[in-house]
Amino acid sequence: MASIGYARVSTLDQNADLQHTALRAAGCKKIFTDHGVSGTRASRPELDKLLDHLRDGDEVVVWKLDRLGRNTRNLLALIDDLEGRGVHFRSVTEGITTTGPMGKAMLTVMSAFAQLERDQLAERTKAGMAAAAANGRRAGRREISAGDRNVKRARELKAQGLKPADIGKIIGTSRATVYRYLSLDAD
């Protein structure tokens, strides 16, 4: 029996180091990691490779349930598929394993609560955005024009030969924002 890890981060600028450390401590010699892939997608390249790699008697280990699936139906279907292939499942953080009936029951309950939490968060986010809109505020980044004082300052510093990262430190913005400022058409 081999314990094989699966890690996932939703955006490319996140890193999976915390997950990798926990999975190695849980006995995983091999870890498949999806970077910049939402858990709502049914097809994830590294998860697909993991599923192809598994053999009867193996164990799939994740750091948390939500790394494997973002909704209860998807998560339970995936685990049913694993069980049908003779593969066990373990979640390190929740302490859940499918090696017995109690673990399977806990998995169902925990994934249902995780789904409820995500649904409530989405509902609160929508309500907050609606309240903000009712008060005349818009979601998203504010619009800027080429006449904005930070845009002008960024251009001045760029003309002096400074790099975008250094300009960002001086005017208090990120390097990406400096690039956005510099790409605006001049008035």
Image (cartoon, rainbow, N blue to C red):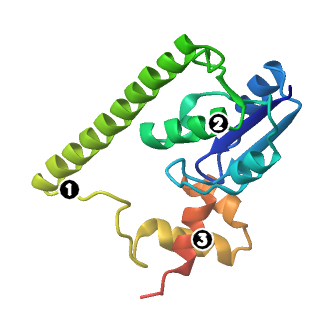
Compute the Cα span from label 3 to label 2.
51 Å
Q: Which amino acid, mark 2?
A: Gly
Chain-order first, disc 1 or disc 3: 1
Q: Look at discs 1 and 2 and give the one toward the viewer.
A: 2
Q: Look at discs 3 and 2 and give the one toward the viewer.
A: 2
Q: From what the image shows, is residue 101 above or below residue 78?
A: above
Q: Residue at x 36, y 30 (%)?
A: 117
In this rendering, does residue 156 appear at all? yes
Identify the residue under disc 2.
Answer: 84
Q: Which amino acid, mark 3?
A: Tyr
Front-most of residues 115 and 145: 115
Q: How many marks?
A: 3
Category of crowding for the residue at label 1, using alpha-carbon neighbours closer than 10 angstroms: few (below 14), some (14–19), many (at least 20): few
Q: Are marks 1 and 3 in contact (CB under 8 Å)?
A: no
Query: Residue 134 location in percent, x, y?
Result: 10, 53
Query: Residue 91 location in percent, x, y?
Result: 63, 23
Disc 1 on helix, strand or loop?
loop
Compute the Cα span from label 1 to label 2.
51 Å
Chain-order first, disc 1 or disc 2: 2
Disc 2 on helix, strand or loop?
helix
In this rendering, does residue 71 appear at all? no
What label does residue 137 carry, if any? 1
Q: Quadrant of the N terminus?
A: top right
Q: Look at discs 1 and 3 and give the one toward the viewer.
A: 1
Category of crowding for the residue at label 3, using alpha-carbon neighbours closer than 10 angstroms: few (below 14), some (14–19), many (at least 20): some
Compute the Cα span from label 1 to label 3.
26 Å
Q: Which amino acid, mark 1?
A: Arg
Identify the residue under disc 3.
Answer: 179
